[in-house]
Image: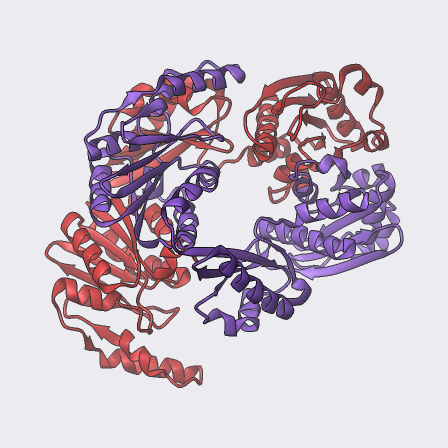
Chain colours: A purple, B red
Amino acid sequence: MKAEIISIGTELLLGEITDTNSAYLASQLPLLGLDLHYISTVGDNQQRLVDTLRQAWQRSDVIIATGGLGPTQDDITREAIAELLDEEITIDSDLVKKFEELFKHYKIDMPRSNIKQAGVIPSAQIISNPRGTAPGWWIERDNRILITMPGPPREMQSMWTNELLPKLQQRMQGTVILSKTLKTFGLTEATVDELVSPFLSATNPTLATYAKLDGIHLRITAKASAMSEAQELIAQREGEIRAILDDHAWGVDSDSLESIIGTLLTAKGLTLASMESYTGGLLANIITNVPGSSDYFRGGLIAYTDEARAAFEFDVQLFSQYGAVSPETAEAMATTARDKLAADIGVGLTGVTGPTEVEGKPIGTIFIGIDDGQRKQSFARDYPGNRLQVKQRAVTSALFELRRILL
Amino acid sequence: MKAEIISIGTELLLGEITDTNSAYLASQLPLLGLDLHYISTVGDNQQRLVDTLRQAWQRSDVIIATGGLGPTQDDITREAIAELLDEEITIDSDLVKKFEELFKHYKIDMPRSNIKQAGVIPSAQIISNPRGTAPGWWIERDNRILITMPGPPREMQSMWTNELLPKLQQRMQGTVILSKTLKTFGLTEATVDELVSPFLSATNPTLATYAKLDGIHLRITAKASAMSEAQELIAQREGEIRAILDDHAWGVDSDSLESIIGTLLTAKGLTLASMESYTGGLLANIITNVPGSSDYFRGGLIAYTDEARAAFEFDVQLFSQYGAVSPETAEAMATTARDKLAADIGVGLTGVTGPTEVEGKPIGTIFIGIDDGQRKQSFARDYPGNRLQVKQRAVTSALFELRRILL
């Protein structure tokens, strides 16, 4: 079946935001056996939006639209679809009640304009949005499926995963397409590509590589007539790839390094504390993004100055001897975090994030220290990129080493 | 004049890469006074590509296509344009010679397939590509301009900046389009919309609102025959909007709250320190994303446990009296950060980020404390959303209040 994506919003045509929704949805459609033929982007202009929808309605079986469902005057996706299908919009009073309760909960007066978001046409089934006020629509008419979702990526992705993907899966029977993502760290994309090169040209399962902030991801996709068959194809290829990539492979699908570490710490009944300098709290922030992290994360220290280091009873003598950016300092930071915050394991993270060199060490130099009470270890890394990228890579690297030690 | 962008490549329809070229080009077109009406993405399929080009040729004055100019069989942009315009492709022997020299320079045998990239039609002027082998085309026919550029972003951007932007600038005289973004915090999008509602329907300047993580942005766009006139139109509308939004407006264009705070602290010669609980270091992380923040940021404390709080000499008695999530605790955290890290200003941030309530206070309850040595203040906030959103909003709110106090 032919699919088409329509991204709606003048901000896309002004280049103010990049359309990541389309790439996300495009990567999902093969799982449904849908062939994506076109992606169209159109602004908040009713005539042009109706023209674009009409063209899609003529040439595609499944149309997925994102954006233009907000409460403001320039959000006109609902109006354009009503015009396309020649249907009337009426206000769903149950939805208005839901909105009123939501605003009441946050002690805000509901603006009149939000009522617009409760509009619905006869062919549309309302798809709830647990992460915002804009509901989606599911429309089936004339052998076509037209779906609308809100533009903010997290609202869209949550609605897609929880509501629309299962709904579409029911419609697309006969072929099972299954994917699994294997996550690696510590290898470049070109190296991963070379290592798994024979599998990249295979047709079932297919294999594709993606460079992400937390390393290189490999997506294995299998097509079969039954789920068990697809699972078997994937399991076999995954085994072959893992044998090649060895312990660079750290997780699958929705795994994150911070959630894996959380699981390991919880299983072993261990606690963690951190001391950072130039990463400025990013390590602690990522660790505490995991719900329930307060059970194993004691706390963190961020020291930018000698006074701050002294306040943590950190041995400032070490600095004059080894410098702020050194393996010895990273280890001592780990020990300080461990002792000061009464944790089982301390992680220290120091490095050069820019804008200038530090102690003659170039931007991108990173030292990770880990003290688990039995052994102090340090790891030296060297990362390309700007300030934010170096911070992110340093933290990913620290989490990766922490995972190895916990295993 | 109406413009349209066409992105070509099956990898875009498979979601393997995100189309950043379109966003880049979209952000460039207003500088030329071109109105971008559509972006279309199509795969390496000649029939669908010709259909897409024909539609663009019918509805737009300037068409900019990227991708599909490589040497392989699936690169068919040249062939599709020849079909659209009913012209013949011939091989340009000068270009073939240039390719041969290039490959010789790199001591590689030129693959036969590269000859394809020397193809040209009578209407097309060849645009050289200093960063690759695929040349672009500039076509002027029937009062339309059709441009093709290679897909790899660095080749495309270099060709655009050095060759095509100046060439288009010569053609598009007489109109200047200028935009300015005004950033606000503390109001919902619907409220902002209601407040500025008379301006939303104006045609010059136009006004649009966008919900972002750091608040609601308002974009003012003016069209004029001279730059000074466009600037004046924007300045007047900006003044009117600022009068309505009052001190909710905190910055413009590329301003961030953390960079504004950095500038204010530097100007006043003041230093800052933080103590966080449930935001887990996000505040310190955002502050230290600013290059040069080590000049004014002393450090940060992150306390998840009583032991950690005690280690910072934080008065744990306060907890039993007021609870971990209270205005008194937020203020005391600010004072601890200030004293312990020897800073001029301390910020304390506590709240409930989930997964469960704390002390009977619901997820989303936030208290911000600020101690500048003269006065201790606290601010209570209540935010919707999941763990990451609550963390982000709490931090944005803390930065916003800190800015107010610094002003």
Residue name at image x 17 percent, y 52 percent = B55
* Left or right relative to B384: residue A314: right
Q: Is residue B230 above or below residue B164?
A: above
**Above-or-below relation of A103 to A54:** above
Residue name at image x 79 percent, y 38 percent: A308
Tell me which residue sits at (84%, 22%) in the image: B315
Q: Give the camera-side residue of A391 and A265.
A: A265
Q: Residue A243: name its quadrant.
A: bottom right
Q: Position of residue A305 (x, y in %)?
A: 76, 41
* Left-right relation of B189 to A342: left
Location of the C terminus of chain B by quadrant is top right
In the foreground, A226 or B280: A226
Across and down, in percent, residue B238 comes to 37, 26
Q: Position of residue A407 (x, y in %)?
A: 76, 56
Q: Quadrant of the N terminus of chain B?
A: top left
Image check: A273 left or right of A207?
right
Q: Is residue B100 above or below residue A118?
A: below
Whether residue B261 can be seen here: yes
Res A354 visible = no
Q: Quadrant of residue B281?
A: top right
Residue B339 in the image: x percent, y percent? 80, 27
Q: Nearer the viewer, residue B279 or A57?
A: A57
**Could you tell me how many numbered marks the image carries?**
0
